Image: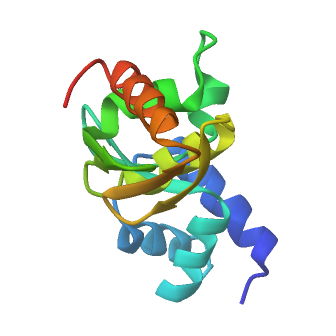
Amino acid sequence: MANKRERHLAIHEIVETRAVQSQDELRKLLRERGLDVTQSTLSRDLHELRLARIPTGDGVRYAFTDAAVATMEDDRGALDHLLPQLFDKVDGTGELVVLHTVTGGAQPVAAAIDSEAWPDVLGTIAGDDTILLVCRSVEARGRVMRRLSSLAGDRG
């Protein structure tokens, strides 16, 4: 069995050079390189590498959540790039914001929100298509909701 570093390098190279749509497809591509991994190991690797399934014009594919920022030619951040693609709707009550995304979109969006380090946001919890944001106050929730809606293109 290959060590973690070899697997991570192989996964990185595959995802950067091919449109990989599923874990099963990625496992087959790794197997072709002599790297036989279990589904649970591959899931851990994808999480550690911060890979997420992102919808594109050609369908869903795996992409690095940080790579979107590195490859963009302008100065927009990851959240500015991801939110318009993955946003569904936003709602809130009290100090809580509930942000709905397309299926599989919550993890990369929550990671991007966390990396922004907004002073109004205490933290996020992400599922598959829903993110809970805990804000510092009711007023902070209002600011966060307006900002999210604006970044998403005023949809929802």
Whether residue 95 is situated above or below residue 38 in the rendered picture: above
Q: Is residue 130 left or right of residue 41?
A: left
Residue at 33% of width from left, 57% of height from top? 130
Q: What percent of the width, then of the height, locates residue 88?
A: 23, 40
Q: Is residue 13 visible?
A: yes
- Colour scheme of this structure image? rainbow
Residue at 47% of width from left, 75% of height from top? 27
- Between 112 and 11, the residue placed more toward the observer is 112
- Quadrant location of the N terminus? bottom right
Q: What percent of the width, then of the height, locates residue 115?
A: 67, 41
- Between 26 and 150, the residue placed more toward the observer is 150
Q: Is residue 36 visible?
A: no
Residue at 80% of width from left, 69% of height from top? 5
- Quadrant location of the C terminus? top left
Q: Is residue 101 left or right of residue 27?
A: left
Q: In this view, does 143 lie to the left or right of 156?
A: right
Instruction: Tell me the quarter of the picture where residue 89 sits.
Output: top left
Residue at 62% of width from left, 79% of height from top? 35
Q: What percent of the width, then of the height, locates residue 41?
A: 59, 84
Instruction: Tell me the quarter of the picture where residue 153 sits.
Output: top left
